[in-house]
């Protein structure tokens, strides 16, 4: 089992003929993901890699392929439109990899997607992977291995680092989800924790947060109140100065709010194991699962 | 992106917000002649991307043109929060009856633009929020409908009992929202929003921060960037398409990915060092970026050791290795270098480095420990 | 019993100090409607007719009075804002009398009110009256009398004419509802028919339509498919030329669609008794209720 | 409110829609000199508030300035659907590869603005809808979001296979929507939307109908009204704040309320007469309105009898009675008058009428029957 994507995921790739889209479409196909179609306006009727049909619009692609998920690799100024197009075509799961989407666009997209009843992951996220089943996005497949741990993170390469350590320690994953580093995103920690709690195969969860906002604090409360499975966490940005965006648009300490210290405290107070270093996640998991 | 008060005022004015006139001076003499043209008392205000200008001596009244010249000269010599003042705004002093606050920010919790208004203006709004939270009214705007008339009136009545002033404020708030959206802002603020003795409502100050992600589609806003008022190394980093933030430590860090970059800094601290910077070379593995990154980091005299931490995913570690080799050939390093590489094309990368007399590690913790030891002169554990 | 308003209706009047608002507020109070408050920005704290408190905003009025309905008499350019203000204050039943509201305003208002979960009656309508219980709007109270007939109409004075005939024939009414003559309005025929069908005291329904749109046709189908109570109807505009707005913004035959003939045919085909003249409604009702 | 093609084109142009140039002529000589300034073939188009201009001979090609003068003279003599042509638009003839249709209307069923596009353009869209409905794509716009880029592209691809043309069309549709909303329109239409042999997409015609209810807040749109091209009696009625529509019958009707006015007309017909007009004096009971109503109705020589049908609610019947008395004193009637009054202040009204030698009835059917009999000369039943 896994959350959000699995063997039955039938994926579209929006922007499949672009530089990033084509590269990662190939990687996903190699991994075994069912890529059933691509979308690039004007290239409708052509095929990607001589196999995957390309369509002019998402609506057409959904009609022809029965896709139930989509992953978006389009330039930032067109990403909002791409997410809304996917939601309008009633695709239930939408993953947006694009970094640099204007935040005011996201205030509209968030409501639109919710109205249409879709789930959005991202934007500015690495996507997700259910090892051995389906990979949607850019998380390198070879660092993951199937197993009982769920992972959710605001980061990309930091996640790879942690997953890599887990895989080396023979702690496989049900699903690794990158929710992205933007201040407004479609899926948050709690959404993923809720799904992992429900997922029969997941026995423990890793949560990797960073400075900015209160998502980790809210998630910690959720863990205490609603979860039966152990959760361990790490927060990046203990040395980040206030008022500066640390790469991710959402990674900013505003005034004295959103610091790593306050998030780690929330973890501790709510029974979430706190890793001081990324590598400590492995030991904490071992202890938690005993 | 920060813009200056005078630039924000120009934008607000275009959206109809009543704002007294004002002109920019870059010399004391210019300030004097502007003051002369207005007659009467003027305010001279430092134009600099920092809060707390008043407390830092960056805002002064001047009763005569001569006084304007004098205070402008003083202000133009100031550094406020490390930023040199290069421009002052000269504006006629207004008669003030009351001071209020009006601002909008993008709020991540509600996922909406949120208004904050307070009849207690002219001071730091965070202070008001901490001490007298009931003096602040917050209102989240539904982006599908914008700030409705009745919502603006509710905010207006929170600021003013008088219906004419409430209406005037409501209109200003709708104009402020329009300016905010049209400029792709993440913050827009009027502090203070004042009433005059004759009852008019006008904006005496203006602040706006623009979402960097909007700049590609708003060229006229992007053109407002004032690089002379930014940290030089950060300007260079932006031009090289790198995300760089200067800090005060001694271990220079080059990392791919923002989260990993922060975690690396934290680990430097954990092992007893101090990070000299945040630097994310991003996902694409262009050797050029590595060259630029090293150039920026080595220009900081505080840096005593440099640490690469690369987790190859999309980033190809061989590209990074090539970048390091190229950069060092151009400008031999004067400080020790620790490289940690793992992931995509790791073997090729190691070969490249070894052939050029460099070595690399694969474990993050070990690499950080070594870099800290080299920077602080302590022994490697 | 009655629909939408009754003895427990606690009414606000938006625009209570205006020319129309003050006139009709007095009439409603005289009729016995519980007018619990009025709204006029800038007159908050004053009293209307030395009794009814006035507030600056609807939110404040609702908080202070516990109003559960509102009636709007404000100029057309401010009516959309007034309706949205009422919906935002979570007033469950909103009646807008104002004529001349721009139709593009209504496309937004319609969605907004629905999102907030309120019911809107109008705009450009005479309001409604549950004889002997509550009168909200401008329908003259003296032409109505309590009884078992429900009435719903797109018109004002034509309704009065019919109600007057009914009252003279001793056919009292549960509720008379004017849904208004605009092309986009909050409550339509079907909404009212549904409510009358559910209302235990209503035994028969009169439906007065006019040219333009397909509301009457849809309502006729609803009568056939969902209603057990007899319905009789009249359509105004049999002599109206195509392409011209007959007073009401919504009363227009577009091309060959929306004619009185097609509506009367839909009535006949679906078992709705068709009155040829307004006066015939009375006879039809008598026959239907036998 | 209808506006002319050339006015709609000006609005569309301001919103960026590509439209060939064009100028207005009110004389044949002006048309000639405009044609001369363009050189080459021009199209001369009647500017009149009526559809089917082409079929009525109101649109003509002219290869030379002389020919332009000739066809302009012919067109300026035309009456199209009873409306005299007073202006022509002269515009260079375009090379056309394909003709499509694009329009927006406010749709009451979906309660939204709805686009209709069809690759079968240049002809009446209702004809296309009737004969080949699959050649029309309809799309309702959510007013909270406007016409999204992807929605515009879906419509664009329905019109054109070529992605460049689809994109050009999508852009035009977004501009058309912006023009529609900004002008408070209830209809906006481009027919035909053409492609040129070089592949450009341009709008050759433009039509817009504005919601009368918007005019108060859009003065620059209200100023486009061309009263010279409207029925004179309807202009007079609008100025008197009456809703009036002229018809061809012999019974003049003065009624309060639109629904009752229609029902009264229907009853006139039911009893064998023909209504001469629709006239709603509205809710407010101003005697002045009655005076104006009578003036307008009596100016129609077809009217053989006048029928008042007033149901007093807000309307005070005594006000109406006073209006009738005043009007008749000013201009004694040449045709018989039937008055039906009931409701508010009925007794006072009857007294006023009786004192002035007039009488009134209270039953609607009886009153209509009498008016029809008087108009047709038949006996009253």
Image (cartoon, coloured by chain):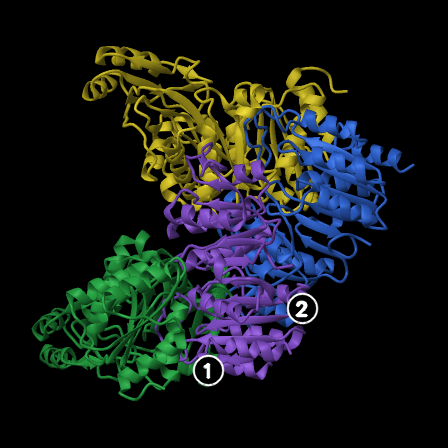
Chain colours: A blue, B yellow, C purple, D green
Residue A43 seen in this snapshot: no
Place of residue D265 in the rendered image (x, y in percent of width and height, measured from the top left): 36, 77
In this rendering, is residue D292 above or below A240? below
Q: Nearer the viewer, residue D162 or B303?
A: D162
Residue A172 seen in this snapshot: yes
Residue marked by disc 2 = A66
In this rendering, is residue C188 above or below B70? below
Looking at the rendering, which quadrant does residue B206 occupy? top left
Q: Nearer the viewer, residue C230 or D65?
A: C230
Place of residue D213 in the rendered image (x, y in percent of width and height, measured from the top left): 35, 58
* Residue positioned most to the bottom: D378
The crowding category of the residue bearing disc 2, from other C-alpha atoms within 10 Å (few below 14, some 14 to 19, many at least 20), is some
| Screen quadrant of the N terminus of chain B | top left
Left or right of D299 on screen, residue D105: right
Q: Nearer the viewer, residue B337 or B266?
A: B266
Chain ID at mark 2: A
Q: Nearer the viewer, residue B332 or C191?
A: C191
Left or right of B139 on screen, residue C43: left
Residue marked by disc 1 = C261
The crowding category of the residue bearing disc 1, from other C-alpha atoms within 10 Å (few below 14, some 14 to 19, many at least 20), is some
Q: Residue at x 46, y 34 (%)?
A: C44
The residue mark sitting in front, 2 or 1, is 1
In this rendering, is residue C92 above or below C274? above
Q: Give the structural element (helix, strand or loop) at label 2.
A: loop
| Screen quadrant of the C terminus of chain B | top right
Q: Give the structural element (helix, strand or loop) at label 1.
A: helix
Chain ID at mark 1: C
Q: Residue at x 70, y 15 (%)?
A: B378
Residues at marks 2 and 1, CA–CA distance in whole angstroms: 45 Å
* Residue positioned most to the left: D29
């Amino acid at each position: 089992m896994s959350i959000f994507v699995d063997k039955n995921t039938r994926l579209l790739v929006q922007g499949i003929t672009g530089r990033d889209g084509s590269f990662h479409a190939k990687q996903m196909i190699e991994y075994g993901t069912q890529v059933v179609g691509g979308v690039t306006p004007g290239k409708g009727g052509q095929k990607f890699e001589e196999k995957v049909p390309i369509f002019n619009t998402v609506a057409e692609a959904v009609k022809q392929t029965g896709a139930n998920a989509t992953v978006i690799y389009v330039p930032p100024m067109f990403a909002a439109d791409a997410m809304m197009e996917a939601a309008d075509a009633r695709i239930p799961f939408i993953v947006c990899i694009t970094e640099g989407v204007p935040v005011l666009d996201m205030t509209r997209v968030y409501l639109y997607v919710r109205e249409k009843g879709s789930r959005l992951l991202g934007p500015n996220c690495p996507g997700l992977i259910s090892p051995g089943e389906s990979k949607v996005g850019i998380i390198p497949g070879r660092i993951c291995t199937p197993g009982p741990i769920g992972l959710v993170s605001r980061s990309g390469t930091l996640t790879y680092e942690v997953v890599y350590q887990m895989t080396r320690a023979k702690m496989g994953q049900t699903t690794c989800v990158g929710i992205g580093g933007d201040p407004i995103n479609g899926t948050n920690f709690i959404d993923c924790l809720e799904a992992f709690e429900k997922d029969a195969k997941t026995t423990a969860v890793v949560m990797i947060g960073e400075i900015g906002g209160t998502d980790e604090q809210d998630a910690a409360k959720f863990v205490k109140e609603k979860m039966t499975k152990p959760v361990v966490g790490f927060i990046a940005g203990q040395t980040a100065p206030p008022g500066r965006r640390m790469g991710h648009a959402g990674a900013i300490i505003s005034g004295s709010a959103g610091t790593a210290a306050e998030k780690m405290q929330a973890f501790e107070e709510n029974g979430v194991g706190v890793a001081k270093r990324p590598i400590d996640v492995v030991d904490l998991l071992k202890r938690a699962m005993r | 992106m920060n813009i200056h008060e005078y630039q924000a005022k120009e934008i607000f004015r275009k959206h109809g917000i009543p704002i007294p006139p004002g002109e920019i001076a870059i010399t004391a003499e210019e300030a004097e002649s502007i003051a002369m043209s207005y007659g009467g008392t003027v305010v001279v205000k430092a134009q600099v991307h920092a809060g707390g200008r008043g407390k830092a001596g960056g805002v002064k009244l001047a009763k005569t043109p001569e006084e304007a010249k004098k205070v402008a000269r003083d202000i133009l010599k100031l550094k406020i929060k490390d930023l040199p003042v290069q421009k002052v705004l000269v504006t006629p002093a207004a008669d003030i009856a009351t001071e209020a606050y009006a601002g909008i920010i993008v709020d991540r919790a509600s996922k909406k633009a949120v208004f904050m208004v307070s009849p207690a203006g002219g001071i730091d709004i965070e202070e008001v929020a901490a001490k007298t939270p009931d003096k602040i009214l917050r209102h989240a705007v539904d982006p599908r409908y914008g700030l409705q008339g009745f919502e603006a009136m509710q905010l207006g009545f929170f600021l003013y009992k008088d219906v004419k002033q409430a209406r005037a404020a409501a209109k200003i708030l709708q104009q402020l929202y329009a300016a905010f959206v049209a400029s792709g802002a993440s913050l827009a603020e009027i502090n203070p929003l004042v009433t005059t003795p004759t009852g008019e409502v006008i904006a005496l100050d203006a602040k706006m921060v623009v979402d960097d992600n909007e700049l590609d589609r708003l060229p006229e806003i992007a053109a407002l960037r004032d690089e002379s008022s930014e940290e030089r190394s950060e300007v260079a980093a932006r031009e090289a398409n790198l995300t760089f933030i200067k800090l005060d430590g001694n271990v220079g860090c080059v990392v791919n990915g923002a989260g990993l970059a922060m975690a690396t800094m934290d680990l430097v601290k954990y092992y007893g060092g101090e990070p000299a910077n945040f630097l994310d070379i991003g996902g694409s593995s262009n050797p050029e970026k590595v060259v630029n990154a090293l150039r920026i980091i080595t220009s900081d005299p505080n840096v005593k050791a440099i640490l690469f931490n690369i987790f190859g995913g999309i980033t190809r570690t061989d590209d990074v290795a090539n970048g390091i080799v190229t950069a060092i050939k151009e400008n031999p390093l004067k400080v020790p270098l620790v490289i940690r590489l793992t992931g995509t094309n790791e073997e090729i990368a190691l070969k490249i480095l070894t052939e050029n007399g460099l070595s690399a590690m694969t474990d993050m913790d070990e690499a950080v420990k070594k870099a800290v030891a080299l920077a602080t002169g302590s022994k490697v554990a």
